Structure formats: C-alpha cells, structure tokens
Image (tube, rainbow, N blue to C red):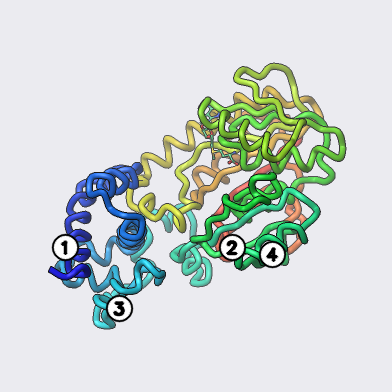
C-alpha cells in the first residue's frame, strides 16, 4: 500500500476511534492525542492527522452519515493546506465533495436561541473559520521584536485597533525567540486584549483577579496598573494554572503581581473572568460545538452567578467589579448580569468604551464577535459598587 493510501486508511481508523466520543466528550482532543501516541506517528503525520481531525469536528454534520469515500473527500477539501497536508488534499479533495447544506448547519441548533447576531453572514463565516495567532507586546520597544521576527522570517501584522496586538500565522513557533524568552510578548487573543482597553482609564489601585487561570489577563492588567503604582492579587481554584502564571510573571518581570491561594480583604477592582462553555472559542476548539448542551449552559449560568456574587463582596465601596466570559450565550452573559443586578442593587453599570468603534456603552456591557477584530468571541460587563 502506498504511503498516501496508508494515511487514508489510518485517518478512517482514527475517525472510528473518535466517533463514540464526538457528541459527548468535551475532552475529545485527548482521544486524538492518545491515538497519535499509540500509533507512534512522526511529527509530520501528527500534524496531518491533527488537522484532519479538527477539520472533521469543524464540519461534523457534513460527514457524520457519509460514506468513507465522501468523508475523506470532504475533509480533504476543507483541511488547511500546509506542507504536511497538501499531498493528502491533492490526492483526495474533490469538488463533488461539497454537501448541499448551508453554513448554518455547521452550528448547533440551540445557538439561535442564545445569540442571533452571530448568524449575520460575516460573523458566522468568521466563527466557522480558523483563528489566527495573536500576541500582545509587553514592551514599548516594538522595533526590537520586529527586528527579531524579520531576522527569523516570521511574518507579523500589527492591529490597527489594539495597540501592541500583532497577528502571526497560526502555525508559527512563537515561543522559541529571544524576545519571547525575555518576556517582550505573550500569546493572547486580540479579543481578550481588547476587553481591558474598554474599562475606564487609567486603571489604578489594588485589584483581585479572581479567576486568573494561567494569567493571560493578569499579566496585561498588571502591566496597565504599573504606571499608577497599582497591584494585582491573582487567585484561581486550579493551583497548576497559578504555577504557570508564576513562570509567565517571571518572564515578564512584573513585580506587582502576588499569587495568593486564599486572598482576603477588599480591592479597588475585582476581575471575574468566569469559567464558561467556551462557545466563543469554537474557531480553536470546534469540537465544543457538538458537546455543549442547553443543560450545560444552564449549569454554567448558575455557577457564574455564584462566583460573581462571591467575589462581589471583595469590591470596596466605589470600586469596580468586572465580569467576563468567552461565551456566545445570552444565558452566560446578559442573563447573568440581569440576575446579578436584581440581587445586588448596589452595583450600578459602569460605562465602557467600545475598543473598535470608540462608542460609549452606557449599559456597561460589551460583546465582541469574531469578525470585529478577527478574534474569539467575548462578553464583558462592568459595575461600580455604590
Ligand atoms: C476563563 S478561565 C480564566 C482565563 C484567564 N483569566 C486568562 O485570561 O487566561 C476561567 C478560570 O476560572 C477558574 N475557576 C473555576 N471556578 C472557580 C472558582 N470558584 N473560583 C475561582 N476560579 C475559578 C478556572 O480554573 C479557570 O482557570
């Protein structure tokens, strides 16, 4: 059997391995990783099968009930062309492989009741496309980073809307440069970067980042607070994520972050970047389209409300409470804000500035959809404790 026929055979075998999990298990990528390890695939083959698997999840309803020949044709047609995939695409992709369905069928049925705006074709097509890689510069010396990227042949495109956000081709090995080792930039989606820019400026005082994770926003917040002498206390239920944040803090040389596994006291600002269904991240994690359920969204809503109420107590009178998700779902966004406000009348909406249009958002709520900045989707709400 030729090499390419063997790749086709193995890809179909991989699909049968994944099939029992793909409408059930949000941890689906771990089954792919296990299969790749079992098959001792080399790095080029790993990249090929990974792209084919992710393409399968992107277009799942178009291949689920198709014959093996059609499945291979459709996946090959929709896979991203790289050095690792081009032979497979050239061999198997065919024009007749296109199904007679609209792009809306690549989104789950429940989405319409959670977010109508995402069905506007430009937003929907962005959501169905692959996400680029964004970095956030942590230095004002952009020229130093540009010089090293140019030397290594790394293409970059600075954003016109968000200063210091650069777009890089998705497959770039971005953590091997000297500039990265020296903390001159971090990987952070531009939508995530834009959220803090919409808050009243300049940011000041002592902040609590209550769901810091590995610290994407913690580092950015600390950088913004540095000129005014402000600090960030970082907390998360996941200790392993906080350890990773510690490594990133060292690289960034930010002395105004304290990682605290049991924070106490009151803060001028509290950021609750809440755990959510991640429906705003489907460009990177397309399998979540098929494992997220309306029950799961309702559970996320309840959990978000509890976490928000718990950390609202930590805000000083006159201070800011900021709630964020990477979800497209009204139930996790506007509905959480609505329920929170009913039970917490002392928290009033704090006007925000839209990072693209510069408009003032008097209701203190910002939604970023994928086409706005070529990003994941996000929601942000801010309140002032009166
Ligand atoms: C959206 S992620 C945070 C991402 C992070 N802020 C960033 O910018 O990279 C949500 C985080 O909430 C954490 N989390 C879940 N339940 C929590 C709780 N009850 N209290 C604090 N953090 C929690 C999760 O461990 C996860 O790291």
Which sits in the foreground, 341 or 217? 217
Residue at image mark 1 = 9
Label 3 CB, ligand 1: below 8 Å? no
Left or right, 30 with reference to 375: left
- Compare marks 2 and 3 and give the one earlier in the sequence: 3
Task: Determine whether the residue tagged by mark 3 lies in a helix, strand or loop.
Answer: helix
**What is the x, y in percent for residue 205?**
82, 31
Which sits in the foreground, 137 or 235? 137
Residue at image mark 4 = 159
Q: Is residue 151 above or below residue 180?
A: below
Left or right, 103 with reference to 98: right
Residue at image mark 3 = 90
Circles 4 and 1: CB distance less than 8 Å? no
Residue at image mark 2 = 168
Give the position of the C terminus as an image quadrant: top right
Residue count near mark 4 (Cα–Cα under 10 Å), binned few <14, some 14–19, many ≥20: some
Residue count near mark 2 (Cα–Cα under 10 Å), binned few <14, some 14–19, many ≥20: some
Can you tell which of label 4 and label 2 is closer to the viewer? 2
Q: Is residue 108 above or below residue 25?
A: below
Circles 3 and 1: CB distance less than 8 Å? no
C-alpha span from label 4 to label 2:
11 Å
Residue count near mark 1 (Cα–Cα under 10 Å), binned few <14, some 14–19, many ≥20: some
The residue located at (71%, 49%) in the rendering is: 184
The residue located at (40%, 70%) in the rendering is: 83
**What is the x, y in percent for residue 66?**
18, 67
Q: Quadrant of residue 356?
A: bottom right
């Amino acid at each position: 059997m030729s090499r390419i026929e063997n790749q086709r055979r193995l890809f179909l075998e991989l699909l049968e391995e994944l099939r029992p999990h793909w409408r059930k298990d949000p941890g689906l990528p771990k089954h792919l990783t296990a299969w790749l390890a079992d098959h001792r695939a080399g790095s080029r083959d790993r990249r090929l099968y990974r792209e084919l698997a992710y393409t399968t999840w992107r277009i799942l309803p178009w291949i689920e009930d198709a014959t093996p020949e059609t499945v291979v044709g459709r996946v090959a047609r929709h896979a991203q062309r790289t050095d690792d995939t081009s032979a497979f695409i050239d061999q198997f992709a065919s024009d007749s492989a296109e199904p007679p369905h609209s792009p809306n069928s690549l989104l789950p049925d429940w989405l319409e009741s959670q977010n109508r705006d995402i069905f506007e074709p430009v937003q929907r097509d962005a959501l169905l496309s692959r996400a680029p890689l964004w970095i956030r510069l942590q230095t004002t010396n952009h020229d130093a980073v540009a010089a090293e990227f140019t030397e290594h042949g790394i293409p970059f495109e600075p954003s016109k809307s968000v200063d210091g956000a650069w777009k890089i081709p998705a497959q770039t090995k971005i953590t091997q440069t000297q500039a990265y080792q020296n903390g001159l930039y971090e990987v952070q989606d531009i939508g995530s970067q834009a959220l803090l820019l919409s808050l009243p400026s300049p940011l000041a005082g002592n902040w609590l980042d209550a769901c810091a994770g590995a610290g994407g926003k913690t580092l950015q917040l600390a950088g913004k607070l540095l000129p005014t002498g402000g600090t960030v206390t970082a907390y998360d239920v996941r200790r392993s994520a906080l350890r990773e944040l510690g490594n990133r803090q060292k690289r960034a040389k930010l002395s105004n972050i304290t990682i605290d596994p049991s924070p106490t006291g009151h803060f001028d600002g509290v950021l609750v970047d809440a755990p959510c269904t991640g429906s705003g991240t489907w460009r990177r994690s397309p399998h979540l389209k098929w494992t997220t359920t309306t029950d799961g969204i309702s559970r996320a809503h309840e959990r978000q409300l509890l976490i928000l109420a718990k950390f609202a107590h930590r805000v000083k009178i006159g201070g800011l409470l900021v709630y964020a998700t990477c979800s497209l779902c009204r139930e996790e966004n506007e509905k959480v804000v609505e329920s929170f406000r009913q039970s917490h009348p002392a928290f009033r909406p704090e006007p925000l500035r839209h990072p693209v249009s510069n408009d003032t958002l008097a209701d203190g709520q910002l939604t970023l959809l994928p086409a706005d900045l070529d990003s994941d989707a996000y929601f942000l709400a801010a309140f002032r404790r009166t």
